[in-house]
Amino acid sequence: MRKQYYFRPSDRGYRAWDVDRLVVLTRDFPRVQIALSDIRELDEAFPADEKGVVTWRNVVGHMALIEAADPSYPIILAADGQVMDGRHRVAKAMLAGKSAIAAVQFTNDPEPDYVDVYPEELPYDEETVDGTSFRP
């Protein structure tokens, strides 16, 4: 799976968190069940492509990622409840008719790995934070 980041907008670009690092930081957090109805991203706009357009190709790409998502891993929530990792797992759970999903949640968000960057500026190699792969 390609390198993934969680982004939040800032005044001059994005703050970005390396998802592999988030997995490492949360691996010993207690798992809780979160109601899908509490995940606000389900009611937000669908992500557009790099040109700001939602295309069928973009939707099909996300469908493939949803199908491949492994629900045995908990989603990762920020302290405020935003999904930092696991939106495709959330979609898969919703499609399966589930009402809740396993999650881990930060009480205080870690500092971002990058500040004032744009997605295309970040490395997308296959390497993880400590050289260990935590997910297929």
Image (cartoon, grey):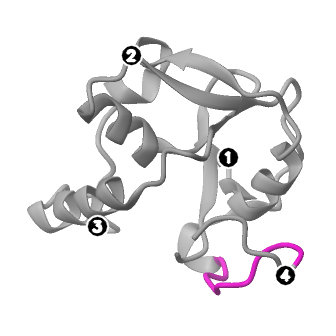
Q: Position of residue 92 (x, y in %)?
A: 34, 41
> Which mark is first along the chain, 1 or 4?
1
Judged from the image, the secondary structure of the residue bearing numbered disc 4 is loop
- Was residue 127 drawn as part of the magenta stretch in this picture? yes
Give whichever of discs 2 and 1 has the lower sequence position.
1
Helix, strand or loop under label 1: loop
Kind of residue at disc 1: Asp
Disc 4 designates what residue? 131
Please indicate, yes or no, whether residue 50 appears anywhere in the rendered image: yes
For the residues bearing labels 4 and 1, Cβ distance under 8 angstroms: no
The residue closer to the viewer here, 74 or 116, is: 74
Could you tell me the amino acid type at mark 4? Gly
Where are the magenta residues, as a range? 122-130
Which callout, 2 or 4, points at the residue further toward the start of the chain? Answer: 2
Q: CA distance from mark 4 to mark 1?
A: 33 Å
SS type, badge 3: loop
- Badge number at residue 11: 1
Q: Which residue is mark 2?
A: 99
Residue matched to label 3: 51
Observer-nearest of 64 and 96: 96
Q: Residue at x 61, y 46 (%)?
A: 73
